[in-house]
Image: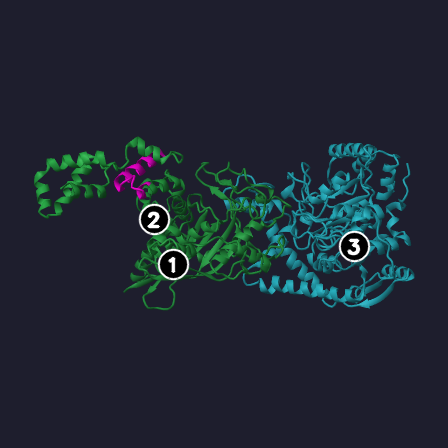
Amino acid sequence: MPAITTLRAMSSALRNREISSVELTEEHLANIAKDETNSFITVAKERALEQANQAQRRREQGEHHPLLGVPLAHKDIFCTQGLATTCGSRMLANFIAPYDAHVVTRLNQAGMVTIGKTNMDEFAMGSSNESSHFGPVSNPWNTDTVPGGSSGGSAAAVAAGLVTCATGTDTGGSIRQPAALCGITGLKPTYGRISRYGMIAFASSLDQAGTMTCDAEDAALMLSAMAGFDDKDSTSAQRQDAWLADLAEHGIPKLNRSLKIGLPKEYYADLSNGGAIEAVQETLAEQGHKLVDVSLPHTQAAIPAYYVIAGAEASTNLSRYDGVRFGHRCENPQSLNDLYTRSRSEGFGDEVKRRILTGTYTLSVGYFDAYYIKAQQIRRLIADDFSKAFADVDVLLTPTSPTPAFRKGQLSSDPIAMYQQDLYTVPTSLAGLPALSMPCGFVNGLPIGAQLIAPAFREDVLLGLAAAYQQHSDWHLQRPNGVRVSQEWEA
Amino acid sequence: MSWEAVIGLEIHVQLATQSKIFSGASTTYGAEPNAQACAVDLGLPGVLPVLNEAAVEMAIKFGLAIGAEINLHSIFDRKNYFYPDLPKGYQISQFATPVVGKGEITLDLENGNQRIVGITRAHLEEDAGKSVHDLFPGQTGIDLNRTGTPLLEVVSEPDLRSASEAAEYFRQVHGLVKYLGICDGNLAEGSMRCDANVSVRPSGQNEFGERTEIKNINSFRFVERAIELEIERQIDVLEAGGTIYRETRLFDADADETRTMRSKELSEDYRYFPDPDLLPLQISEAFVQTVRDNLPELPDARCERYQQTLGLSAYDAASLSSDLERAEFFEAVVDVCGNPKLSANWLNGELSAHLNSADLEIATCPVSAKQLGQLIQRIDDETLSSKTAKELFKALWAQADAESAVDELIEQLGLKQMNDDGELTAVVTSVLEANPDQVAELRSGKDKVLGFLVGQVMKATGGKANPKQVNEMIRKNL
């Protein structure tokens, strides 16, 4: 296990010339070569060294962006020009995009070094990283357990110290749940905060890029580089948030008063291991925040509504994988139908097929109103629940996931039980709200997470509150095998 | 039994934007296959559509021109089906909420009546690519250059009652979109295509018969012929005691028939739903007003103006105003010569005849508006007779040089009327001397022989004499 530091510590070591970005990159590559978690699908050795060299030259020319020269891993859902982008699928096993995702472009501009592409559930469909064509990822805390999903590779890589930060995407909890299960900090920003261009679509109205880091301060640094309007994404938000523009320079804005924190009772009803989350409440109360009970009455309907909407969108988003222009193509097609049927049957795994089938079904004539329209109505009710709650409170505190990491194979044969993993993360996704998962304790030696949810475009509240909590706790500094994250650079 | 046909058309108008409706790729026709298909058009993973506002503006123009409601809030939907030339596996279209709502188009029929054709809606969508079946043996080629070209689909009510009405309606929409500058109107390049819904019913019956849809017809002539054939076929089936089934048919111009493409029972479920990659289309009242303020003069207004201020007959005005290029050519001719009536006669007469026999459009006319205007000017000032004017026109046509000077050509060809008294007097005198009998008859009051004598003078001058002048001189010289 390598020595693990925060992004900020790495950044200041680079700035102080304690290490060069090339040396840092070589160190990362050496660690990844010894990786036993299967976190990476592609390691971009030559490209990474080239980028590290570039970063070094930029530094010599006087640049000092906090991300300059810091290695990171991209979830393999972000297109990278000239480097394989598989989305965890056999369908795209040989796909090389001729363009960079907007997120990749932005982080390249900031000078970050792409060390590789991380493993994930196929097309981001899963909560355990077991649906990847490239094999499951192991949770570094216990290799018999899953890291969560779908950004399981990114979460495991950060937890194992292979990288200090990684990108992820969250459609129904795919950043927050693996962050919780791996004991790291995961931020899903507001829908529209970060461009989706070049991020392979699962469910377009829900997909959102975000960050997987050691702590909230590091998340803020990455967010400031990734966020912003993009004219290539019609759903990207035109916002001018001064705090966001100032983040890289001034850090997270200070919480200038005590917050009113809502505890939605529907999220606490079935909590079997409530001790850790209650401790978070106590810590926050000690800091002067006020905790109140609130209700989000339509929470129970969120999972079915989510799986209808996400499935519907996925079923048509994945129609382009037809074996005609790119991606997996079957051998010797005998007819057009044969080409379609075999290319897709061979190229997609079971979970993806399941969602295409259910999505196609819910959009079909005769079922559309009963499923898709009904689910959209529920989506509206859930968003209204949050609006009402936020009329009274500043932020919500909930558990991130119903359980800590479960054993590999434990839920694979029971999709419904697997879908329940998203119970606490899905409602936020349906409402498009920002949410953050931060480590808050352990159950049976496995990390668990607390989720903060804020009104749209108030990531500043999430980051500020999480940073304050992390100043009074050290869960986020704990790593497997007694390793601690160092906030200082140690040569 | 007598039958009545009921026809509605869905016309696909390719909008003349520079770039595609959801990508920045060029829409220029005729490029190398797949040279104008960018990542968005190819449907590569992760790319996203961004709406081209120029297409929206064009749709609004059309809506305003037909007096339709403009829906300030409309939604783009995905129409899902698999086909190799549809890269994303869905077409972005507007299903539940089109940008243009109900409007109407008035047709002037040959019998002098008018037919008001209801427009149900017009919506924006993207075109698909092309499958090329005859280039690679045993394989299909895919050309995605056309993918994402903006289309305005104009759907009419079933208000048309004959094949010729349908063709006239198609022609009228064609004229209108060219007027508005929203489509190049090039039928050969597929800039306008239509699907025709056709049914027949016994005359006097209110309910519609079962209909069939003829797909993808792309010329005025084919619209008329395909519908004619389909009406005949349906009547034959019904009169033989058969039944018409809902189906999609194909018009085969070579075989001169329509035939079954697929039956509607097997038709696909397109699973329409709002495209989550695009926000609802919101249009402001102010934007609509700006488009309205900038609308060009429309055919009806122009027709009215030609009658009121240029003094043209209703027929001439209608025939010159229905097509924008024709109207602009006409106005350019009038600008030069200042004689609208004679200009109208020449455009509808000599010029049209030449264009028709050469199968040319006014845009490719070898004689320029300036030349025709100068020619008419020379008729007006009696330099040319109607006969020499036609000769000159032929010469200009053959020369096909828009820059050549009309007056020089008149000199060169010696077409100038003989207006000089001295020269003409000599000819008149010699003609009178050579025809003493006719002169005597004329003197005795038989005016009929005057024409003969004038004709003799014209013959002797090779048609260059001014007949009116000759007329006067003969009388004077009797």
Judged from the image, the secondary structure of the residue bearing numbered disc 2 is: helix
Q: Residue at coordinates 30% horizontally, 58% vertically from top-left?
A: B236
Query: Would residue B236 be found to the left or right of residue A461 on screen?
Result: left
Q: Mark 1 lies on which chain?
A: B
What amino acid is labelled 3 in the image? Glu
Q: Distance between the residues labelled 3 and 2?
A: 71 Å
Q: Which of marks 2 and 1 is nearer the N terminus?
A: 1
Q: Quadrant of residue B275?
A: bottom right
Judged from the image, the secondary structure of the residue bearing numbered disc 1 is: strand
Q: Which image quarter holds the N terminus of chain A?
A: top right
Q: Mark 2 lies on which chain?
A: B
Instruction: Using a 10 Å C-alpha cutoff, classify the residue at mark 3 as few (fewer than 14 neighbours), some (14 to 19) or many (20 or more).
Output: many
- Which disc is residue A401 wearing? none
Q: Residue A193: horizontal and vertical position, in percent?
A: 72, 52
What range of the chain is rendered magenta?
B378-400
Identify the residue position indicated by label 3 in the image: A459
Nearer the observer: mark 2 or 1; the answer is 2
The colour of chain B is: green
Viewer-nearest residue: A10 or A12:
A12
Q: Quadrant of residue B9?
A: bottom left
Farthest residue in the top direction?
B412
Identify the residue position indicated by label 1 in the image: B107
Viewer-nearest residue: A490 or B347:
B347
